[in-house]
Image (cartoon, rainbow, N blue to C red):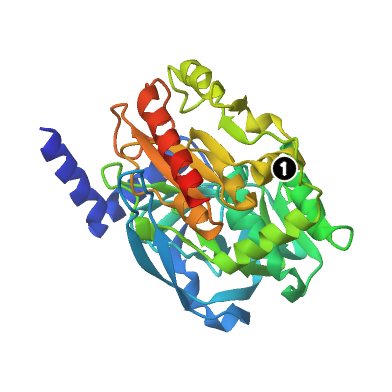
Amino acid sequence: MSYIKKNIKAILLSNHWIDYLIFYLIFFLRKKIFRIKAVVYRIDNILNYNKNIITILKQKEVFLSVGPKTIEEKPICKKVNLEALCLYKFDDAIVNARSSYIVYKNRLLTESKFSNERFNEGYIMFHGFKNAIIKENDIIDLEEAFFLGGNGCWNWYHFLIEIISKLIFKDEIPTKHIVFSNDILKHESMCKVVAMLLGNDYKITYLDVDKNYRIKRLYYINSISYVPFNLKDNYKPFGIEDVYMHSDILVELKNKLVGHLEIKDLNSPKKIFIKRKKYRLAKNQDNLIEILKKHGFIDIFFEDLKLQEQMKIIYNAEFVIGVTGAAWANIMFANKNLKAICFMQDNFTTFSCYSNLANIFNVDLNYFFYHLGYTVNEHHKSGYELDINKIESIYLKMQNAKFKNN
């Protein structure tokens, strides 16, 4: 029966005509019955708008996406063709701080490469293959701005790797006005990054996430780093090739941020366990911590630390262990020869965000996969139990390899 359900769902998701009918049924229910102000826009790809390109910042290239590796198995790698990185200008475009995609001339412009991606964030209430329902929030008019909102702007990984990295090209932008989501104001680390990269030379506006903004002259850069924010079909996993990064830009971002702070510290702990307060919390986390303490580890809640403390800890660390999550974006601040073990659920063995970051920043990252019994793309649940003996064994093998290499 589960096999039949799975295949019926696959047919529904792949059939554009069925999608079309379901789409308009949802639109009717939301607009007419629940009286939500909304409008339908055709989905279009930003690659079709070459006339709006001001500058080509980087030419097309090929990225080698590196999948997760374990102590027993080498990573699977896939080549990804990257489009040119461009600075665009759109007149009278509409944006929402929590969406990566913009409305222009009655089209929703996206750059999604994957038919299985679900990007209904911000003002995008629902989308199919060809159309999207956009919520008509109150609209505020702005003269001109460089847009740095986007999917997951409230999340440290998406903010650091996908959004703020675009400021590497700030000198190419014809405006000194930059707009962010007001989600950033809730996070000291995000505010600190903005201050370090922009100083006092720019006007910054933090957009209300509950409003839409019509910008007379909107400047926009397509994705420097990319991972599908969510997937439509929970039975189709992420692919290693679904993730890409412009490695040189991320290295330049690291150098700029590290250069602003004094983060070398001989007294900083060398072995770190990234402790969880909620989400992906193991039943036996405390038991694991007790074992790791015998090997010199200390446990830290990264979300409680200011930016400089996070950077300092990773920069000076020799070994980091913990469950997958946004805190792992900090491995971009590693100095050299950092070793790490990341726990990840065994339905996500091809999720390659952190394995790619590790490859770019020369971190020896091995994965340990745990099982909980969930659908393919669930990745936030707690209640799993870790094999502590196995994790300790992985740690000892990595340490012994380090000593042999030295």
Q: Please identify the quadrant where the N terminus is shown.
A: top left
* Residue 257 horizontal side relative to residue 36, left or right: right
Q: Residue at x 29, y 34 (%)?
A: 375
Depicted 132 relative to depicted 319: above or below = below
Residue 114 against residue 302 in the figure, above or below: below
Residue at left offset 43%, top offset 23%: 382
The residue under the point 70% across, 70% down is 169
x and y percentages locating residue 345 in the rendered image: 36, 35
Residue at 68% x, 39% y is 313
Q: Which residue occupies the extreme right position in the image? A: 200
Q: Mark 1 points at which residue?
A: 312
Q: Is residue 363 visible?
A: yes
Mark 1 neighbour class, 10 Å CA radius: few under 14, some 14 to 19, many 20 or more: many
Point out residue 142 in the picture as x, y percentages from the top left corner: 76, 61
Q: Where is residue 310 in the image (x, y as percent from the top left)?
A: 69, 39
Q: Is residue 97 visible?
A: no
Callout count: 1
For residue 386, above or below residue 95? above
Nearest the eye: 259 or 145: 259
- Amino acid type, label 1: Lys
